[in-house]
Amino acid sequence: METASRNIDPVLPELIRSALLYASEEMGIAVRNSAYSPNIKERLDHSCALFDADCRLIAQAEHIPVHLGSLPWGLKRSVQEIQRRYRLQPGQMWMVNDPYISGTHLNDVTIVRPIFSEDQLVGFAANKAHHTDVGGSVPGSISATAPDLFAEGIVMPPSLLVQNDAIIASAVEWLASNSRTPDSRAGDLRAQVAGNFTGERRVLELIERYSRATFEAAIERFLDASERRMRARIAALGDGVFSAVDYLEDPAGEPALVLRVTIRLRNGTAHFDYTGTSPQIAAPLNAVFGVTLSGVHYALRAVTDPTIPMNEGCFRPVSVEAPEGSLLNPRRPAPVGGGNVETSMRNADLLLQAFAKAAPDRIPASSGGTMSNVMLGGATGNDQPWAFYETNGCGMGARPSSDGPSGIHCHMTNTLNTPIEAIERYYPLRVTTYELADGSGGAGRHRGGDGLIRSLTLTEGSARCSLLSDRHRIRPPGAVGGEDGACGSHHLVREGARSLLPAKTTFDLQLNDMIEVRTPGGGGYGRPSAN
């Protein structure tokens, strides 16, 4: 392979890499256009990637960091599990949502398509999409109080979804029948299948055009190029040891969960050690190791050079150590629904705080630090079941050279909001407030972005609501003398009476009840007096 890699036209690796990158983006378009649920069709809560025959990442779309950083870890484990029990064959697709295999949480269903050319395995197309409801104790399947994984919803090991290029109806029914919204589950699964067919088609077109040998040689070339660039950028940060500690609010609202990291940079390599992080807990704030990896790769990419093509080459200079049985590497069957959303956000904050000691002129102040998850579900007046899920934007931390943006999805999420028109069309909900929380960003030479206020009123039937947020007790810290951002809050308005709700809670909604979600602002950068 090394000889073939050296002998190919040096332009071809870049042409093939660019074609693969667009193929992964085209996969995402296919999923979006075919999806049933607003969470995928409107919020774009899905991610797509392509891998070679050795399960190495070769291209990914610019979708969701927490999905994409965990996909390589999850794909390798999924394929290992499939090959341990079965045999990969042409015409198959496999589905899996077990977080301890696929790498995030139960709502994220991963679909894997082995790609064959002339009966030889040449790669994989894979995508991950957040299914709004996969069973469990609460609508939306992300509980604030689930004691173990099994209370969070259906757990699927790698299972055959497509055989001989035909969808297996019983496999679709297996997932759909364990959801409060079976029609959407079936439709979203088929959308994911369409995405993988798209990725496979583009890979095979490249192999047909350039030959399999050239395709594989090109992969080696551009993986090596990404590795060289990443090593050079890490080396430019300088050797050293940089540490940080941050806190996550536990289910009772106390900032009692410790996240600690030590980053060791040496000779163009980076080692991340999470020793000192709190042990796992019997509540869904644990983050499987794949989620922890996603934070590492996101932060490192943001700090070094986001123009480096993201593939397996970027992973080679990086090693990560998280104690088994900790909040960032729990043992099965610890619940992990919120780890993918809330703990992942705090991990990003933690890593950037540590990197700020290595490159203080390149790191912003802390952002809102929460995805502010809202899960709602119930039955309409006609007894039709429904389930709604979305994350909410917050204020981004001010940057060394400019103010932080307001009301956006930061760091580990890269989704959109759910448009008001879609909410009011598909759900018995009315959006009564949607505005920026003026003044919630921290003051500074550059001001932190403001959070937002979003209020939803139940207009029909009954419902159950789960809220999962953070930064209700500890404000997002400013940087270099900048002031902290404001905390977030939740309120319930019932018959005109307004009451404060916990950051992490589940409760029943009555007709005409309104819930208000106020998200945190970002920290300021630099002393305000410097203005």
Image: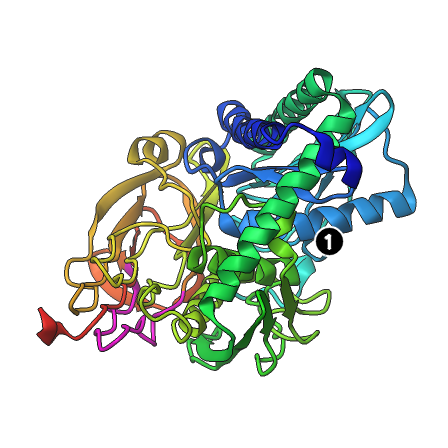
Give coordinates of residue 235: x percent, y percent: 52, 65
Give coordinates of residue 242: x percent, y percent: 48, 78
Nearer to me, 267 or 456: 267
Residue at point 23% right, 44% down?
A: 432
SS class of the residue under badge 1?
Answer: helix
Give coordinates of residue 308: x percent, y percent: 50, 47
**In screen coordinates, is 330 left or right of 114?**
left
Query: Is 484 one of the magenta-colored residues?
Result: yes
Give coordinates of residue 222: x percent, y percent: 62, 40
Residue at point 51% right, 78% down?
A: 240
Nearer to me, 182 or 477: 477
Quadrant of the image containing the N terminus: top right
Query: Is 179 one of the magenta-colored residues?
Result: no
Q: Which residue is mark 1?
A: 101
Q: Which residues are magenta?
A: 470-492
Nearer to me, 312 or 334: 312
Q: Tell me the amino acid under the disc marked 1.
A: Ile
Nearer to me, 443 or 2: 2
Mark yes or no: residue 148 visible: yes
